[in-house]
Every structure is written in C-alpha cells, then in structure tokens.
Amino acid sequence: MSHRQVFGVSRRQIIRGLLATGAFGLTAKLGTGCTSASTSTSTAGDSGGGSSGKDEPITIGFIYVGPKDDYGYNQAHADGAAAVAKKFSWVKLVEEANVPETTAVAESMRSMIDIDGAKALFPTSFGYFDPHVLKLAKDYPDVQFFHAGGLYQEGTTPKNIGSYFGYIDEAQYIAGVVAALTSKTGKLGFVAAKPIPQVLRNVNSFTLGARSVKPSVTTQVVFTGNWAEPIKEAEATNSMADQGIDVITCHVDSPKVVMETAEKRGIFSSGYHANQLALAPKGYLTGAEWDWTNIYSQIAEEMHAGKKLMDGGIPHILRGGLKEGFCKVSDYGVAVSSDTKQKADAVKAKFMDGSIVIYQGEIKDNKGNVVVAASESLKQQDPKLEQMDYLVEGVIGSIGS
Amino acid sequence: MAEGLGWWGVPLAIVAGTMRGGTPFLFVSLGECLTEKSGKINLGLEGTLLTGAMTAYGVSYLTGSPWLGILAAGLAGLVLGSIHGWLSQQFRVNDVAVGIAMIIFGSGIAFFFGKPFIQPSAPQLPTLNLAGSNVSPAVEAALQISPLFLLGLAIAPLMKWFFQSTRWGLYVRAVGDSPDAARAMGVSIFKVRMLSIMAGSFLAGIGGASLSLYYPGVWTERISSGQGLMAVALVIFARWNPMICLWASLLFGGAQALGPSLQSVGIKQGYYLFNAAPYVLTLLIMIVTCSPKRTLAGVPGALGMDN
C-alpha cells in the first residue's frame, strides 16, 4: 500500500471531506444567505448627536413578495419602510425582496432574527402568514411580527403577532367619483386579478363612488385570473378600450402594464397601490395609494417607547382608511377639471370627518338581489364587508367562474 | 371613441392578439424547431426568453435604441445557447435535464441583472401603422404591427426553404435524423448541433425582446409566464414544420386574447375556461391528430437520443 497517510486519514478521505464541507457550505449559503436582493440600509446611529442613552438602534425587518420598485404593492411597503428609516435615526432597516410564499420566507425571517438581530418583522405578503409567520412566532416569542392582512384571531393567534391593513376602498370610492365625472362615455373599466373579497370590495367601492355622482355609469370588470399576468392585463385593457371604455383602473400586483397600455390607447387611467403618474402623464386621473409611512412610523415609535404586542401596549389589530392615514388619493392629473376636483375633495372631506359610509343601504347586487338592506349601514370595520361575494348594481361582470 | 365596438371587439381582439401576442411564440418556436431538427431538445428557451426580454429592455433603456436592444437580446440568447449546446453534447448528459437547468439559470440571470430595470421606462420599438387615417381608433390600435412580427413572418418560409433546399439544411436534417449517416457524410455532429442550438437561442432571445419592447412592453419578472415552455410544446404540435409553427403561434397568440375580450363584451361565465383556451386547444388538436398506427410524423429520428 503506497497511499500516503496523514494522521491515519487517507488522501481520498481528506478530499471527500473537503468536498462535502464545501458543498454543504455552498448550499447552505444559497438557501439562506444570498436570496436575491438582501440589502441592509443602516442609518448612522450617531447622527442625532447623542441626545440620550435611549437611542439604541432597533432592527426592523421587511420582507416583500416581489421586487421593491414594481410601481405596485411591494413598492408601497418599501417606500413606507424607507421613510421610517429616514425619519428615525435609531431604526436599522433590513429588507429582502422577491421572497416566495414558501419555506423561503421562514428562512428569511429566521436569518433576519438570528443574524441581523431583528426585533420586529413585517412580512408584507398575505400568504406568508399561515403557516410560516405562525410557526416563527412560536419559535421566537420575543420578536414581534406585524402582518399585512386580516388574519389575527383573538385567542388562537400567538400574542406576538399583530395585524394591520388599510381600507383602501375609500380612496377607490373617490377615484370612482373622479372617473365618473371625467369619463365621456360613462363606461369605466376595472382590470381585476381574482374575485376575492378584497378585490370585489375595491370594484364595488369604485363603482358606488362613480354612481354617487352619475347614476348611469357602469363599470366593466375583467378578471385575469392571477396577480401578475402582463399579457392578459394588456389584452384586457385593449379590449375594454375597443368597447368605448375611457377610464380604466385595476387591482393587480403591478399596475404598470395597465397604465401604460391605457396611455398608449389615449384613454384615462386611475392608479392603484402607488402613484403611477409618471407612467401615464396625459391620462392619469388619480389613484388609490397605500400610505404605510404613518402606520410604520407609529409602530416604530411605540416600540421605541418600550411598548410591546405581547403585553397589549401595541394593539393587535390596526385598521384605518383615509382619515387614519393608511391610504391616500394621488394628486389629480392634468385631465381632471377644477369642478371635478372640488367635488372629489368634498367627498374626501366627508371621509376625513367620518360622516360618510360607503356601504349604506339599500344596495343591490348586479343580479337584482338586495345585499345591504335599507336599514343597514355597514361601517368599514364590519366583518360582513370582509366576506364580500357580490358585485354591486352597475358592475358588468360576474364572480362565478 | 364615441361608442364601443360591441361584439366586433372579440374578433378584432383575436386578430390583434395573433399579431401582438403571437410574436414571442413565433420566434421561440422557430428557434426550437431549428434546434430540434438537429436532434437536441432545448427546454431552456423559457430562460432564454426571459434573459432576452431583460437584456433588450436594459440595453434599450441604457442606450436609447430599441434596435440595439434587440441585437443584444439575440446575443444574450446566443451565449445561453452555446452553454446548452456544449453541455448537452457531453458524454452521458441528458439534454432535457440540461434544459431544465438552463431554465433556472436563464431566469436567474434575468432576475439578477433585471432588478434596476423594473421601474424605468425604456424606449419602445416603433410600430408600423397599417391602417388608414379614417378608421376608428380601435382598428387603428389593432393594426399597429411590430416590425419584429414581420421579421418572424419572413423567417418562417425562409427556414422551410433552408431545410428543404440548401446543403446546410440537409446537414441539419441529417444530423437530427440519422447521426451515423451524417458522420459518414463527413459532417461534424457536434458543430452542426452547436450552431443549430445557438441560432435557435438567438431567435428565442429576439422573442424575449418582442415581449419587453413591443407587447406588453414592460420588463417584469413574470413577463414570460411560461410562454417559452408553451412554444417548445408548440413545435411538437407543429410537427417540426416551420410554416405550421407560424400558424400555431398565431393561433396561440389569438387564444390569449380570447378570455379578456369575451369578458369585456359581457360574457360573464367561464372566464377561467377562456383563459385556459390555449391549453385546451393544444390538447384538442393533439387528440384529434394522434393516431395509434404511427408515431408522430416528422419527428427527427435522433431527437432526444443519447448520441
């Protein structure tokens, strides 16, 4: 046997061992560490000039399901996060984009907690919640999880999970008012992803807003079947433009395609998620935007003051609309007349002082059934609205597949 | 736009859809047709399509010239194709497995380098306006044809001619049908397959450019939504004939437009079914044209073989 032996280990075994370690290291790194765009923006902690010893940095993690600059849902959250980091020097922001709703998000959260030392996490996509956030919350009882969506249940959900979401349909209602007053044909279009309650609520509120100023207006809804279907979204917009529809809005992950196609066809558009004025400078009327800056700042400040979800210092359910600053209406575009602006601002003022209820009876669905009785007045918090399964009168379309 | 088109909107959308949505299918399927004629399968064209779309958009944005973007997309495809061509011809390497790896690689590359290009708007390809000035805006919009579509239209018969009537076409067919005969002719199987795969990927890259620079004209990570894979299936469906690839691509492009346009004229039921139209169509035609008596007509003899 002429094999050289080092400490009784053959060369073959050493090479094998090295290879195995290398491969393990590589896969482990691939699996967790370098998932796409993991940028950490740390703001210099001493920029405040050492005002007090309380200014120890808090690390907050944000996780997005798509890219951070998609003119859509993720960008709205990322903008809010960036604003918080800018506002408070003691916030250290850790972000990760393009995290699918699989065990990948559990890994991301775990490494944010273990490696970056995050004290609070904001997994912003709906599908992260069950089972990933639930599981991680049990594993890390000291970390606070804030989830965007209506899934908190008193008693069953762990104490360190909070839920926040905005009533963006209030902004859609105002966008509907603007759309109806600007439209020449009286036909509005809505490109929607899936017939789920949140989407239907936006379609209905948009239509109710439109019909509150012009009862003859109709909204044509087209479901594309999924959150990101660029070609179908473009086809839907084109088809609706062919039908004489002259204002189009949408509820899809990234409204970019819809806005640009509408602009190309020379019709008006109304945005969603974020401000899309830059995409359609001529036809952009207004839009329903999220405004997460307020809510994120509020949570960050409360955490800074030592409050916690676990002891009830921070409420588990945070909800709000225009009044509470959870969402906002885009600045009006050039195509909106001053008369329309006035009327829309009047409606907005009513939302601000709380004197308007969108789902005020009597409301019929588009098959003629009464869905909200004349005596009923469903406020935004009403759980009935979270189970919406109808399209109101004036919407052309059907939710049945 | 005073009034709507009503029911006429559906055929119009389908016709427009064939030209708008069919272009990427056309390029990818022609590319795959060339590749498969040489006896190798390149499933990686899905990744190539994405890389092409990203490259075209990025280059068009950075240089301001969409034409340069198209060229860059083709070259990016060429590079991916050369990787596939080399890998899939190694000893005991399966081309389907390599293709799947290339899907992941191509899309990974596209997502990685595509990050900064999601938000900006890149200059789009100019379109040729076929309609006169006195038609309604709806028809005018439908008849804005991309030069890429015309290019694809020209490539299909050209490729048929190439296979039928040129010496090089014969080499490709020989390598794909009977590598032993080709070897006896003194043709290098490796080189022919390499070049075929590279040329095919070049076309697929241009198909990607058509997605991001013409229709729908944005770069997002979900822009292809499986079109690359569908185009690969389409080649089988077209029996490896470039002209049938052309018709099949148009059909699929038109079928994509069916769901949204039917909904917009007020057909309320079954939109999931209409959205699935391209797939249903494939299944139907496969069933109708299959026969228990023979294998697929026109399949290259050595396709997917280990040689």
Image (spheres, rainbow, N blue to C red):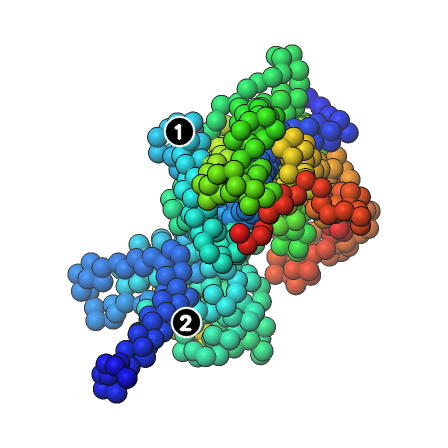
Q: Is residue B116 above or below residue A117?
A: above
In this view of the protein, can residue A238 be seen by the observer? no
Q: Quadrant of the N terminus of chain B?
A: top right
Q: Quadrant of residue A239?
A: top right
Residue kind at label 2, given as amino acid type: Arg
Query: Measuring 37% from the left and 61% from the top, which residue is drawn there?
Result: A34
Residue A279: image location, x then y, percent? 47, 34
Instruction: Provide the chain ID for the residue under circle 1.
Output: B
Whether marks 1 and 2 lie on the same chain: no
The numbered dot on residue A2 is: none
Residue linked to disc 2: A110
Residue B87 location in percent, x, y?
44, 52
The kind of residue on which mark 1 rests is Leu
Q: Secondary structure at mark 2?
A: helix
Tell me if residue B147 comes above or below residue A95 in the rendering.
above
Closer to us: B242 or A148: B242
Residue under the image location 43 percent in, 27 percent down: B67
Residue located beneath label 1 in the image: B68
Badge count: 2
Q: Secondary structure at mark 1?
A: helix
Does residue B275 appear in the picture of this structure? yes
Do the numbered discs 1 and 2 sit on residues whose CB atoms are within 8 Å? no
